[in-house]
Amino acid sequence: MRVVAVIVAYNRRELLLECLDALAAQTRRLDAIVVVDNASTDGSADAVASSHPDVDLVRLPVNTGGAGGFAVGIEHGVSTQHADLIWVMDDDTIPTPTALAALLDARASARETPAILGSRVMWTDGQDHPMNTPRNKPLASAAERRDAAAAGGVAVRSSSFVSMLLDADAVGAVGLPIAEYFIWNDDFEFSARVLRHRRGMFVPASVVLHKTKARADTDVDPGERFYYEVRNKLWLFRASSALAWYEQPLYLAATARRWLRTYLRSSDRATISRTFRAGWRDGTRSRPRTNSEFLASLGLDATSMAAFEAASG
């Protein structure tokens, strides 16, 4: 199996270099590493080129957000690096030395090969990171739960881009992350779409550190970014094939609780209210464009993305 790591980077040069050092120290050597630099202004791309010349560095002239970066990176990993498996993560993700090996061991032990495997994500204090805490698959069969447990994992319905091992064949079947999401809910929509008819697994033995500034979830005072939470969730419910009709009520209820919790916990409720209204307006009146259309609108060459879209799905 050819395993390719894809890291999306934006203005976290020192953490990015730490991430690359951790990837180089994996007990299971990677076949290639792709870094997508989202128009960083702190010298991240030049630092990678200087200190890690073997890395396949993709320099984007504009910031496409995490969603755009992962769409570009995964497409590059499949089309250019010919990956069988793609290991995706943010630039502030620091894998422990056996993180990849543990994912691959669980994959090999599974009775039915998972399309996605996710790591245990911890913060710098050794506690589980609330931003990336996996949730058990709510409607998993008893057999699926037993099979996952026998492989050392837990059956899940979605996964986080903070250490996700992804089957390239599944990407070819369902397509890429939606670039126009920009940030928030892109990994949920994408992984739920991949796992709509496939199995996913959380692997506690695979451990990575997520070096965010604080050990907090995304619903703690998100400020202006709350717009993307609202718009993208509405796009998910209205335009995505990620959820079956019988799953939608469960996730709609969870989303309503999350939005209310965000508002009640916020120290700037005026911003939450304003961004909610803007997100609701755009989420109900529009749908995301194809990746090639969105990237082209940013002035990027979307030729390879258009070719991938034509061949997938």
Image (cartoon, rainbow, N blue to C red):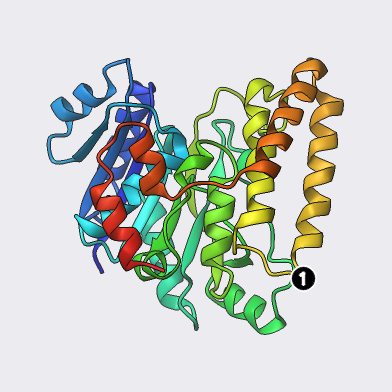
Quarter where residue 299 is shown: top left
Tell me the SS state at disc 1. loop
Residue drawn at x 59%, y 31% as measured from the top left: 125
Q: Nearer the viewer, residue 93 or 291?
A: 291
Task: Name the residue at the front extreme.
Answer: 285
Left of 282 or right of it: where is 301? Answer: left
Quarter where residue 96 is shown: top left
Quarter where residue 309 is shown: bottom left
Q: Nearer the viewer, residue 196 or 88?
A: 196
Left of 96 or right of it: where is 308? Answer: left
Left of 253 or right of it: where is 174? Answer: left
Find disc 1 in the rendering and name its residue: 246
Residue 131 image offset from top left, x and y in percent: 63, 39
Left of 281 or right of it: where is 15? Answer: left
Count of residue discs: 1
Residue 199 image offset from top left, x and y in percent: 55, 73
Mark 1, other Cα within 10 Å: few <14 / some 14–19 / many ≥20: few
| Quadrant of the rendering where the N terminus is positioned | bottom left
Residue 161 image offset from top left, x and y in percent: 49, 47
> Given the image, on which type of amino acid does mark 1 rest?
Tyr
Residue drawn at x 34%, y 26% as measured from the top left: 62
The answer to whether residue 230 is above or below residue 73 is above
Q: Is residue 134 visible?
A: no
| Quadrant of the rendering where the C terminus is positioned | bottom left
Residue drawn at x 77%, y 46% as measured from the top left: 255
The answer to whether residue 92 is above or below residue 189 is above
Q: Nearer the viewer, residue 151 or 155?
A: 155
Residue 230 image offset from top left, x and y in percent: 70, 38
Residue drawn at x 39%, y 34% as measured from the top left: 91
Q: Nearer the viewer, residue 261 or 119?
A: 261
Q: Is residue 97 visible?
A: yes
